[in-house]
Image (tube, helix red, strand yellow):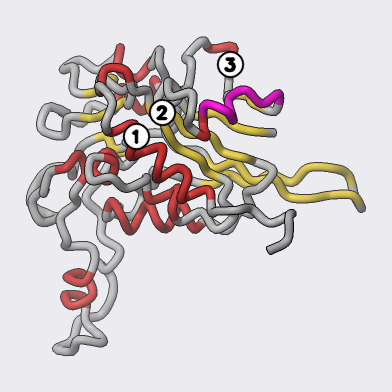
Amino acid sequence: MGTTLPSEDVLVRMQRDLKRALQRDPKHVRWTMVIDQGKCTGCHACTLGCVAENKLPPGVVYRPVIEEEVGRYPAVRRRFLPRPCMHCQNPPCTKVCPVTATYANAQGVVVVDYNRCIGCRYCLVACPYSARTSDFGEWYTKETPDAPSVLLGRTAAAQSYEAHPSTEYGRRWPQRGTGSPIGNARKCHFCLHRLSAGMLPACVTTCTARATFFGDRNDPESLVYHLLGSPRVFVLKPELGTHPAVYYLK
């Protein structure tokens, strides 16, 4: 093997980091994401992986990829910015919730209690990153034709994806259309249900360019700990003092 090739996939190292973090006292773990903007190719695999993992309906996207054209003709190029919830350590969204349905958990992940959320959407307005959306109960298959076939049929198509209950937050929610999280504010939660099962977030494992990194920033052996020491590190809107747990590399 050539010396320029990596000795192992970074997913393997992050999986080891995750296993080590899960053995630590949860109070000392701080989940952190680092996104290398220079590596991101804008393939949107992370967006699709997140949608599939969390059974997200139309209008609800936890991890959009924002595209921007930079430079001046003829030296122009496209730049991509995956933008999940920043999981701010000083989150504006939690302070405006009138029923304390959204809060930062012990590991610094900003979560939503769907059973407590009343759908007022104050948190959507308060988020300076527009990282929250509201679930209006829409269906991808609503306007599609229905027929008694496994290949063509709204009901069959819905049963194969949309009607499946989400497993967010480690719970099996009711079949879609019968209650929460419809009507609630929804957002990225770092795939907590996967972390508890020893798996990395879906957006990390589906990143084809290996541009997304995840781990415990309090662990000096972790990959994210070392990446945070890079001079390329920056956060979005640092002037707001929100202290995001999602970092970027220029």
**Residue at (18% x, 49% y) in the render:** 167
| Image vertical order of residue 236 relative to residue 51, above or below | above
Magenta span: 225-231
Q: Nearer the viewer, mark 3 or mark 1?
A: 1
Q: Is there CB contact under 8 Å for labels 3 and 2?
A: no
Report the residue marked by disc 3: 238
Q: Which one is earlier in the sequence, the residue at label 2 or at label 1?
A: 1
* Label ID, residue 20: 1
> Horizontally, is 14 left or right of 43 in the view?
left
| Image vertical order of residue 151 relative to residue 173, above or below | below
User: Which secondary structure, mark 3?
Assistant: helix
Query: Where residue 144 appears, x then y in whole percent?
Result: 28, 75
* Label ID, residue 97: none
Q: Quadrant of residue 208?
A: bottom right
Residue type at tag 3: Pro
**Residue at (12% x, 27% y) in the render:** 116
Foreground residue, 81 or 145? 81
* Label ID, residue 216: 2
